[in-house]
Image: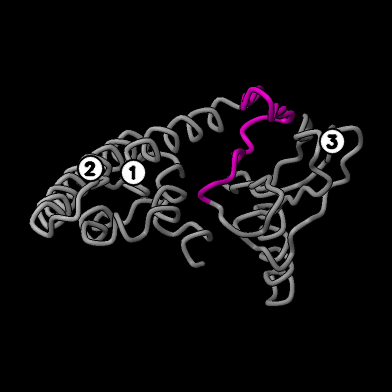
């Protein structure tokens, strides 16, 4: 077999493996009646976000993506952590319902949604203690108590995040969790990736 034949064979194998990683699926469902814009963003490539037509609060789109991709459906290209729907293409048909927040047809997407809700609910974001006094000492005491309680909440949130990551080490859910909570996970990230898990090389983390 000459060099040219070997090169052609290698290219064919590369093409076959490339196509083998792709999956075709239909995503449909409902959005808020007031929503007119819906972006479909794959692996946070916002520069190539697809605008999905919305008619009477309903939409349907056929796409072809990598089987390990994260598909975000949102009315904004920003704020991925606040998106109601981030999907994992583990089936050929996924349906979402913005009224109920339900995802059907995708067990992995449901698993990711539950993980996000669990960690977000433990967030100290927005937490504060009101002080109805002009006493400086009362204010200082309240602020110190607030800092202490926020630290406890952050520790609990990190604990939940680590549980999610450890429970999903064989899939790509940890990649999205790390992407959404970088400041929270940064101090412990070297320990989480020391055995080079597959999720650590996910494209979304290069963002």
* Residue for badge 3: 60
- Can you say whether 111 is above or below 4 in the image? above
* Residue for badge 2: 153
Residue stretch in magenta: 81-105
- Can you say whether 25 is above or below 11 in the image? above
Which element carries disc 1, helix, strand or loop? Answer: loop
Q: Looking at the picture, how far across and down is residue 175, in whole percent?
A: 43, 51
Quadrant in which residue 50 is drawn: bottom right
Q: Earlier in the sequence, mark 3 or mark 1?
A: 3
Which element carries disc 3, helix, strand or loop? Answer: strand
Q: Is residue 90 magenta?
A: yes
Q: How many marks?
A: 3
Q: Separation of disc 1 and disc 2 at Cα? A: 7 Å
Q: Looking at the picture, how far across and down is residue 182, in whole percent?
A: 36, 59
User: Looking at the image, which is closer to me, 56 or 203?
Assistant: 56
Q: In this rendering, does residue 80 appear at all?
A: yes
Q: Separation of disc 3 and disc 1 at Cα? A: 33 Å
Is mark 1 in CB contact (under 8 Å) with mark 2? Answer: yes
* Residue for badge 1: 123
Q: Quick one: which residue is furthest to the front in this view?
A: 134
Crowding at mark 1 (Cα within 10 Å: few <14, some 14-19, many 20+):
some
């Amino acid at each position: 077999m000459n060099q040219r034949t070997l090169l052609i064979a290698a290219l064919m194998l590369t093409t076959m493996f490339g196509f083998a990683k792709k999956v075709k699926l239909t995503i449909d469902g409902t959005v808020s009646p007031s929503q007119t814009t819906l972006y479909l963003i794959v692996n946070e490539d916002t520069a190539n976000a697809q605008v999905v037509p919305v008619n009477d609060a309903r939409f349907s789109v056929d796409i072809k993506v990598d089987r390990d991709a994260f598909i975000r459906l949102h009315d904004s290209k920003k704020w991925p952590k606040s998106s109601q729907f981030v999907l994992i293409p583990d089936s050929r048909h996924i349906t979402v319902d913005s009224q109920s927040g339900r995802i059907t047809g995708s067990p992995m997407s449901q698993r990711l949604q539950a993980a996000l809700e669990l960690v977000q609910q433990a967030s100290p974001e927005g937490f504060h203690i009101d002080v109805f006094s002009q006493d400086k000492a009362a204010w200082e005491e309240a602020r110190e108590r607030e800092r202490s309680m926020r630290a406890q909440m952050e520790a609990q949130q990190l604990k939940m995040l680590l549980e999610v990551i450890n429970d999903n080490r064989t899939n790509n859910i940890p990649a999205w969790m790390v992407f959404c909570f970088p400041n929270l996970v940064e101090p412990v990230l070297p320990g989480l990736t020391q055995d080079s898990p597959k999720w650590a090389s996910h494209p979304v983390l290069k963002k």
